[in-house]
Amino acid sequence: MQNLFPLISSPDIDFESIYNYAPVGLFTFRVDGTIVHANQTLLKWLNADAHEVMYQNLSMFLDRGGKIYYQLFVQPILRLEHDVKEISLQITTDKCTFPCLFSATAFRQTEDGELLFAATVYQVSHRKMYEEELLRKKEKAVEEKEIKAAALQQVAYDQSHLVRAPLANILGLTALLEEMDLTDDVRNMVTLLRTSANKLDSEVIKITDKLNT
Amino acid sequence: MDVLKRNNVRVIGEGNQTIIFAHGFGCDQNVWRHLIQAYQNRYQLVLFDFVGAGQSDLSAYNSERYQSMDGYVADVLEVIEALAIKQVIFIGHSVSCMIGARAALAQPAYFSDLIFVAPSPCYFNDGDYMGGMEKEDLEALFNMMDSNYLGWSGAMAPLIMGNTDRPELGGELTANFCATDPDIAREFARVTFYTDCRTDLKSLTVPSLTLQCAEDILAPIVVGQYINQHTPGNTLVLLEATGHCPHLSAPAKTIEAIDGYLTARKALMYAKPLSPDLIA
């Protein structure tokens, strides 16, 4: 079978261009957050020159919530595990703002060299919109469920009060009828009427109990 | 209720005195790694996770108990009672510092010292008081937490508790020491960040140390000074460390400061019977 992909021997690949222009922000930072290297893609996304990014702390590029989150969650993981994955952050400077996924992993250039972190930043504007859409739908579903539950509660309340009141009248009148001088046929009918009305009452109670739980 | 299981309590190290470590908001007892190494040969160490964090028993969480700081204070006291330890050195980080302070107000006899790492009695700006945060900041943090579960998942949660010995779950479990049930984390944050403990400070009778970082987004330098000025028997040490977690970013300096304080305290205790006026 013919190979569909061209074979390129390694000297022909310009690694530096790939590093600089691949559609991913790449940078290196020290354990305290100081950025010591950034690729062209990241600079383009940040709409900044190298000197505006180099030797700055990476939390400078986060929004306020992100700064706190970085301190509370990301820093401890980096310090102890030396590796974080897929942290959702909002890059915010006075020149740009975009949501991204941030990953970083530790490395050393020499055996006893300084601990550095290699990091990637992926823009995820579309994914973020999708997530927000999902979240919105979930919140809407929860809200609708609550409205439905409240309506059912109301129905239960109405049933117990509105339906059972006339039923009580029927039962009361049936009791009065039973005290009267009746023929056997009529007495049987009145008894059946009372039994049925009682049954209806207990069914209504069952329904309202169920709706209230 | 097994308190030791509920709070995933670990007792390690050897020594006549006990140190209890209370982690702050965000992660779990793993954050004490460097301090454990430094102290396990000199002290008995008690480590635990607050309910909702780390490998605590999530089923023990109930919004009623933990709707105020009292629930977390009770956790600390119950752990101490369950282990029957006395004269404990409490080392707390961040929001746990005031949990420790309140525990010491309730049961002063349980504690010999309180060590506050990056504490704040009130995180919000209030008139002249500069807590450092505005209400919107906490909402922004909640939004961040909502979009980052850090590997936490409702399906995984029941497996995590008490299963550290199951290697097949290893990768999932160990990498996620900051992963927390987002609903619980949110309530924990709301309770601990919003509780104003400023008026508690003046009543503290247990001696304490405040370790303040030079650049801490959650506790500006003035907060450390505030605690020092308003707490009887408080020692303030400004650490040359940035960030909110000096026990991770500058462990050597943190340990040095704690050692310095504890040594001075010991010297003072020995001096007591000899010359009472020295400690006046």
Image: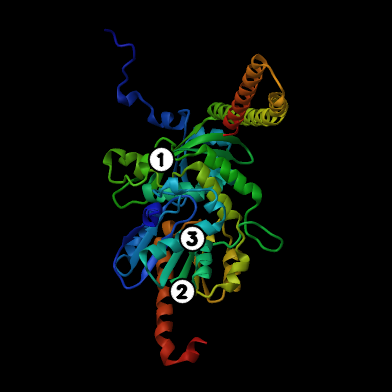
The answer to whether residue A59 is visible is no
**How many neighbours does mark 2 have within 10 angstroms: few (below 14), some (14-19), or many (20 or more)?**
few
Disc 2 and disc 3: Cα gap in Å? 15 Å
Pointer 3 residue = B74
Image label count: 3
Which is nearer the N-term, disc 2 or disc 1? 2
**With respect to residue B197, does A186 lie above or below?**
above
Measured from the top left, where is residue B259 in percent x and y? 40, 71
Give the SS element for disc 2. helix
Disc 2 and disc 1: Cα gap in Å? 37 Å
**With respect to residue A187, does A103 lie above or below?**
below
Measured from the top left, where is residue B194 in percent x and y? 61, 54
Pointer 2 residue = B109
Q: Residue at x 69, y 19 (%)?
A: A182
Q: Name the quadrant of the N terminus of chain A.
A: top left
Q: Name the quadrant of the C terminus of chain A.
A: top right
Which chain letter goes with mark 3?
A: B
Which is nearer the N-term, disc 2 or disc 3? 3
Q: Which of A149 and B133 is in front in this view?
A: A149
Give the SS element for disc 3. helix
Pointer 1 residue = B157
Residue type pointed to by label 3: Ala
Residue type pointed to by label 1: Ala
**With respect to residue B3, does A149 lie above or below?**
above
Give the SS element for disc 1. helix
Which chain letter goes with mark 1?
A: B
Residue type pointed to by label 2: Ala
Measured from the top left, where is residue B94 in percent x and y? 51, 58
